[in-house]
Image: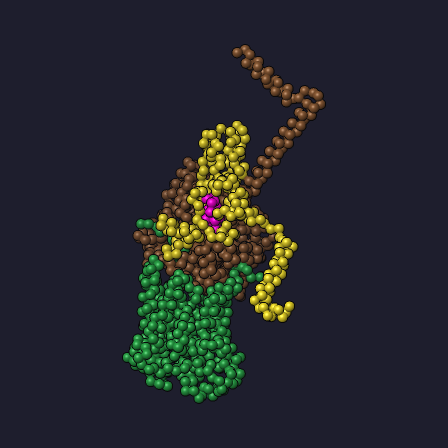
Chain colours: A green, B yellow, C brown
Amino acid sequence: MSLLRVTSPHASGLKKVSEVMRDVLLATVPGILVMTWFFGPGTLINLILGGAVALAVEYGVVALRGRDPRVAISDLSVLVTATLLCIALPPYAPWWLIVIGVLTAVLLGKQVFGGLGYNPFNPAMVGYVVLLISFPVQMSSWAVPRELGAVPGITEALQRVFLPGSIDALTGATPLDLLRQNTGLLFDDLMTTRPELSGWAGVGWFEVNLAFLAGGLWLLYRRVFTWHAPIAMLATLALCALMGFDGGSSQSGGSALFHLFSGASMFAAFFIITDPVSSAVSNRGRLIFGALIGLLVYLIRVLGNYPDAVAFAVLLLNFCAPFIDHYTQPPVYGTRKQTP
Amino acid sequence: MVQWLTHEPLLAALAALLLLGGVFGALLGYAAIRFKVEGNPISEQINSLLPQTQCGQCGYPGCRPYSEAIAEGDAINKCPPGGEETIQALADLLDVEPQPLDAEHGVEKEPVVAWIREAECIGCTKCIQACPVDAILGAAKVMHTVIADECTGCDLCLEPCPVDCIDLIPRKQGIGYWHWPLPVDRFRPIEVIATDAVARTAA
Amino acid sequence: MRVIHDIHGGIHPPERKALSQPGKLASLGLPPTLVIPLRQHLGVPAVPVVAPGDTVLGGQLLAEANGVMSVPVHAPTSGTVRAIESRPIAHASGLEDICIEIETDGLDQWVALTGTPQWHECEPTALAERVRDAGIAGMGGAGFPTAVKLTPGPKRPIELLLINGTECEPYITADDTLMQGFADQLIEGAAILAHILGAGTILIGIEDNKPEAIARVQAAVIKAGASIEVASFPTKYPSGGEKQVIEILTGQQVPSGGIPADIGIVCLNPGTAVAVREAIVDGKPLTHRIVTLTGEALSQPCNTLACLGTPIGYLLQSTGWTSEAQQRVIHGGPMMGFAVSNLAAPITKITNCLLAPTEAELPLPEEPKPCIRCGHCAEACPASLLPQQLYWYARAKDQEQLAEHRLFDCIECGACAYVCPSQIPLVQYYRAAKGQIRDSEQERARSDNSRARFEAREKRVAEEAAAREEKRAARKAAAQQQADNGGVDPVQAAIARAKAKKAQQDAPQ
């Protein structure tokens, strides 16, 4: 019998890293299902391909680094990275786009800094931005939603992904694309005349964002993260949209509802900016972090060159996170000025 | 003049640069003299980081000469009593890369103090004269003893003693000096100076 | 109705208090040997006044206090002093310390005790002296000499005496049992303490998971007709920390780097209060305390009134301990206790619990994963620190940033490590960092002192050499002058004398 000497505390709460990651993956399921309904099986193929590549690459690289690869795989963090990236990529994107994106995300976004917990930038966003800048054509050809065209079946989907160019595919503009290309119509007219924009935020997009919102609220309930960053981002985005919405003229930036429920707003708010490794540390810091991302997303969407701005906004704020941390330390017990 | 400048853009650019350089150089030179601050010479700051054992293991006769040598550009890794912590502090102060301790000058050992075996002491005062910090109490033909709180463990008293009655015993023993060590992290050994990591994890 | 505030953070681990049947005291007999450390408190060890071979009676002084931050030690029962040597003690390091080993004779004979039932008429300073002479140190776990706490000095007037009956750590029920069984003594003890401190208000704080204790204490207050307030508040770990319970019950925060006396509050453990009462009213020194013996590896977990100095192994055997291969025995609770390395180590004034869990009950920690910066630790921290940043800076040994993030305000409660999904032993990092910083400061002070001594010595040596030079020059000048004045040149005369002497010595040859 040996009496082991270990340090206190001797009891431990039950949450583990793999459980946190598993919760995040579960929360993406509603959004993925809705995307599949509206845009076809493209996202599913992205996910399977991306997930497989990510696991393989992580295993290989961790083994090369001399650490135990099974431990690295078992915490599921690379699967989350791949999932988030593949949701963001257009369905039916060519297979090589997925592979390059995942490779960049895992290698450049995560492993080169030291693996889980050491990356200063959100790995999925690193992959996305590299793809967006290198392959703008493929990245901006989004699928046509169900109500406006036939949704491809499995075989056609596989063909489009693995044999790109063999089929003439129908691609369309996203609502954000349309908004930025609009030059003459009033906002309300735009929403009623363009078929892609029926509803509040565009066909299919509204429901997708709603599904991600549901997933995100479930994660809040499970206390995977705190409310500060997502609420700050959405509130700031809505506020900016309200301020910029000058009644719906042709120069307007789009209504608050439009911005909140179109593009990747909800997805970003609950899945991207809540990545704990690359965001701010304290709750006050997270409020600032989320708010600035919301502001940047609005500005880039309305004034910048890219239709959706989440990836850039997030990366820019990842740069700022240590600076925010430095200035938002909470008041420690005993440092408050006493009221006599 | 202006016409000539516009006709010779290359020469004009050169002239502009020379003029600006001259003006700002003069400003800086003036500021360097007029606003000179009598601050701590760097060797003082270096000396305040050294452990003051005055043992000479670095090759210099004391800590101050070594600090002056470092200010002249000598290596910072020659002080065994200071160990890794001192090398890191010097590296931070001088903004250079920390080096592992130069084994030629000794190895980092636990802190020690001298201890005289009083039964054998003959009262010759040779050790008292050798001690650089006056940590030995005694006089001719009178018992000598080391004041442990003042002793730096430099071991300069061992050689002069004709009856070899001085030992070096560990200073930090007992429950009062114990504290928890940093946890061992198998995946990322915590090392200040990278080249030490290989040796230590191998051990 | 007192306003109850909330502390930042905190956790709710499973309480597991019913396991040790609080409220009942089991009798486990007298061990054959007692090992009494000379230091069972925070401060300087006591100095023995007995020698090996002496017979001692219960309550007899074994070692006297050495200075202000020291506490005397008494014999818990009668017997013979076998040795005064290094023995294993219950300490996280596993190191040994000087102890007085007593072989008990089983007769439990005591010295005559003289108490002061009329303590209202005594001077507070005299009472504080008696508290010191009784060997009382804080029995909540820190072991601060109580007499020192009771004399904060004229600059710190005390308004409030707070008896901390929180006992927030899981498994431990020693204070609960004490408050249920010794409520009257607790009330009188609190009154004595308030008298010594000159405090106007007495408050007893008890967590709401101890309803029987609250009821008994309230009944005792009414019976004694004392003006003592009993406040209960929601259960949360670590509400029982001194700083936390003060914040909960008064809304004030102890200033960083300060003590509760700075804001007019003194906080004491109920066991300490009962011990003070025994010392003043009965004249009995501190020789026993209630210890919780719990954990699923014991077949009869219980609370017992044990002699100080009882070996831990004896108590475990008496409660049916089954040893397992991979096992810990924890001195204290699961959150802040340390694992004992030698079962011969004795219990002391600060031992409130011995926890013997099975492997399944409290699994050994897993290999820590990398930090994912989730921030759960910061949410749990009762001192509103950023444990994550402290972790990174402790690894980097960045003492400046650690000070800026207020490492020394950490109370080492373990809530951060409890919630960490990567199972990082955060508290060990902070303890190690604190130890390193204290070490560095000591070393710096030492080397500054050495430098000053060295420079003083250099100066002295230089002055002596200069003085010698001057004297030599003066003598030379005087000799020169004498020669110039026409008299005998003393140098030449000395040389001539020496030559003559030498010639004389050589001549007889």
The residue at the far right in this view is C485
The residue at the far top in this view is C508
Q: Is residue A72 visible?
A: yes
Res. C355 image quadrant: bottom left
Please provide percent x and percent y for residue A11.
38, 59
Q: Is residue C352 visible?
A: no
Please provide percent x and percent y for residue B68.
54, 45
Left or right: A55 with respect to B96? left
Count of marks, rendered view: 0
Please provide percent x and percent y for residue C299.
32, 55
Residue at image location 43% in from the left, 52% down from the top = B193
Where is C236 relative to B89, above or below? below
Where is C296 relative to A155, above or below? above
Residue at image location 44% in from the left, 62% down from the top = C377
Residue at image location 51% in from the left, 48% down from the top = B73
Q: Which residues are magenta?
A: B77-89
Res. A199 image quadrant: bottom left
Q: In this orientation, which residue lies closer to the viewer: A331 or C63?
A: A331
Please provide percent x and percent y for residue C88.
39, 44
The residue at the far left in this view is A155
Residue at image location 36% in from the left, 68% down from the top = A103
Q: Magenta span has A6?
A: no
Q: In this orientation, which residue lies closer to the viewer: C6 or A133?
A: A133
Q: In this orientation, which residue lies closer to the viewer: B133 or C304?
A: B133
Q: In this orientation, which residue lies closer to the viewer: A4 or C266?
A: A4
Where is A125 relative to B39, above or below? below
Q: Magenta span has B81?
A: yes
